[in-house]
Amino acid sequence: MTENGWVDETSVRLRDGAAVQLRRLNDTDIDAVIELHDTLTDRERYLRFFTMHPTYLKTLAHKLTERNGKGYALGAFESGTLVGVANYVVSSKPDTAEVAVVVAHDDHMRGLGTTLLRRLAQIARHNGIRRFVADVLTTNYLMFKLLADAGLQPRHLRPSHGVVHLDVDLTGSASY
Ligand SMILES: CC(C)(COP(=O)(O)OP(=O)(O)OC[C@H]1O[C@@H](n2cnc3c(N)ncnc32)[C@H](O)[C@@H]1OP(=O)(O)O)[C@@H](O)C(=O)NCCC(=O)NCCS
């Protein structure tokens, strides 16, 4: 339990019956974050980072795992292995945060992405975040489906050069 009363760790059951722990990442998870991203195919890395060979994974792992009040990274762990991460980073507007989700390649389609995003939205609301934003490739139909499945409906879509700027009003989205 955090000082403001928020439970930082919870256990959920996926639709295949598997038990998964959801908890905030910390600095012991740096290697696990890198290993998770290593499982992605080139296409999946492209969908996430707009490049197939991001050179900043180590930096990203450090940023996701440091607790500095500028964001929140929620990890899904199965039998101790990190299988997914959903995170937000607070933008220059304190009630707005950029959101991203990634699930280990072999664990796609188990409901992990939806579960992580739903929970992250709940945590974000609790932490005073009112909007999620994200720049998503127009070809990343799974991200659009994921948002809809998580009860998050983007309000504004502005496609430009193959990228859509998503803007989700968390105050109007379903609460879980
Ligand atoms: C997008 C991503 C996070 C989805 O994670 P996931 O755990 O597979 O998502 P879920 O299992 O919750 O699936 C959500 C829906 O998409 C469907 N889906 C997931 N992967 C699919 C695939 N390869 N083909 C068809 N449908 C798929 C699921 O069946 C589910 O729909 P349903 O509830 O009707 O069954 C994952 O594909 C990923 O890590 N992609 C690479 C990174 C990325 O693109 N991130 C988003 C940009 S920040």
Image (cartoon, helix red, strand yellow):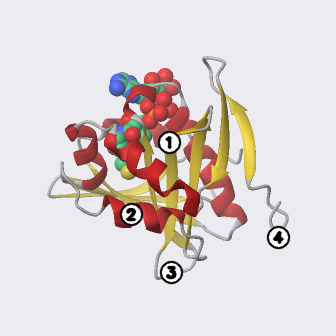
- Image spot of residue 44 (x, y percent): 28, 40
Comparing labels 2 and 3, the label whose residue is closer to the camera:
2
Q: Which residue is outermost to the bottom?
A: 92
Do the residues bearing badges 1 and 2 touch, measured as CB atoms within 8 Å?
A: no
Q: Which residue is mark 3?
A: 93
Image quarter where ligand 1 lies: top left
* Circle 1 crowding by C-alpha within 10 Å: few under 14, some 14–19, many from 20: many
Do the residues bearing badges 4 and 1 touch, measured as CB atoms within 8 Å?
A: no
Do the residues bearing badges 2 and 4 touch, measured as CB atoms within 8 Å?
A: no
Determine the secondary structure under disc 1: strand
Q: Which residue is mark 1?
A: 84
Residue 73 horizontal side relative to residue 99, left or right: right
Q: Which residue is outermost to the top?
A: 16
- Image spot of residue 83 (x, y percent): 50, 38
**Numbered tag placed on residue 60 in the rendering:** 2
**Numbered tag placed on residue 33 in the rendering:** none
Q: Quadrant of residue 70?
A: bottom right
Mark 2 residue's CB less than 8 Å from ligand 1:
no
Task: Name the quarter where the N terminus is drawn.
Answer: bottom right
Q: Which residue is mark 4?
A: 4
Task: Name the quarter where the C terminus is drawn.
Answer: top right
Which badge, 1 or 3, comes first in the chain's sequence?
Answer: 1
Q: Which residue is at a point 56% across and 40% down the rendered structure image?
A: 150
Does residue 169 show up?
yes
Do the residues bearing badges 2 and 3 touch, measured as CB atoms within 8 Å?
A: no
Determine the secondary structure under disc 3: loop
- Residue placed most toward the observer, 104 or 87: 104
